Amino acid sequence: MRELPDTYLIQVMEDVIEDLHGHVHRVSNLSVDLGRGLALGEDDLDRLALAGVLHDVGKIHMDPGILGKPGPLDRSERDLMERHPELGFAMTRNRLDHKIAEAILYHHERFDGGGYPFGLAGSAIPILSRIVLVADAFDAMTSTRAYQAALPVEFAVNEIRRHASAQFDPSVVEIFLQLAEINALPLELSA
């Protein structure tokens, strides 16, 4: 795995978001592995590495009480949380490669068009975003969060398999399942 730059944004994110360091690096590592499995070039693998680390950078604008809320978010809190991709894009679009900023902006778009912030579908969603979505979803399920204990890896793998072609790009899921088959998925130490 390539070395990532130690940026001020990453340090700020780590101060604001619980277990951010572990989460973003696992997302980054899995994103690169998925991109490699899809035969992306070195430039896109480098972009994935940084997009994986910075995909949640917009959350530094969120109320820590919402980020660490132990129960479900109410509608207004969810609306605020769903703004983090756009905030992250605004923070990075003039500072980073445009494909990295786009990966941040679209990393919650669903393959079937049911995601946010724009409801894009299929190939209208950049491939880097489709990859980060799978990596982020897997880590979110298998990591302990304020609102949920870590779920079993087998459960998370089955959820991603089950939602291929709906939430997730089936070509990315295919590579993900290959990695799962050989036990090559990055996991939180307590998972």
Image: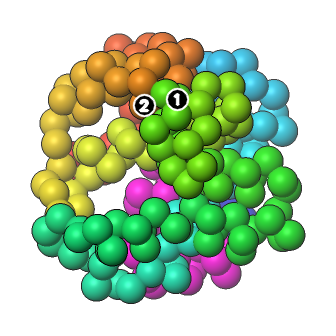
Quadrant that contains the N terminus = top right
Task: Verify whether residue 11 appears in magenta.
Answer: yes
How would you classify the magenta stretch by its main secondary structure? helix
Which residue is identified by label 2? Answer: 167
Residue 153 lies, with reference to residue 8, above or below; the image says above
Query: What percent of the width, then of the height, locates residue 84?
Result: 53, 67
The answer to whether mark 2 and mark 1 are in CB contact below 8 A is: yes
Amino acid type, residue under disc 1 in the picture: Phe
Q: How many marks?
A: 2
Residue located 40% across and 68% down the image: 79
Query: What percent of the width, then of the height, locates residue 187?
Result: 33, 43
Residue 73 is left or right of residue 70, and the answer is right
Residue located 13% across and 55% down the image: 149
Label annotation for residue 111:
1
Category of crowding for the residue at label 2, using alpha-carbon neighbours closer than 10 angstroms: few (below 14), some (14–19), many (at least 20): many
Stretch of the chain drawn in magenta: 7-28
Res. 176 image quadrant = top left
Q: Nearer the viewer, residue 48 or 188?
A: 48
Amino acid type, residue under disc 2 in the picture: Gln
Residue located 46% across and 63% down the image: 82
Res. 10 image quadrant = bottom right
Q: Tell which circle, 2 or 1, labels the residue nearer the N-terminal end.
A: 1
Res. 166 image quadrant = top left
Residue 185 lies, with reference to residue 109, above or below; the image says above
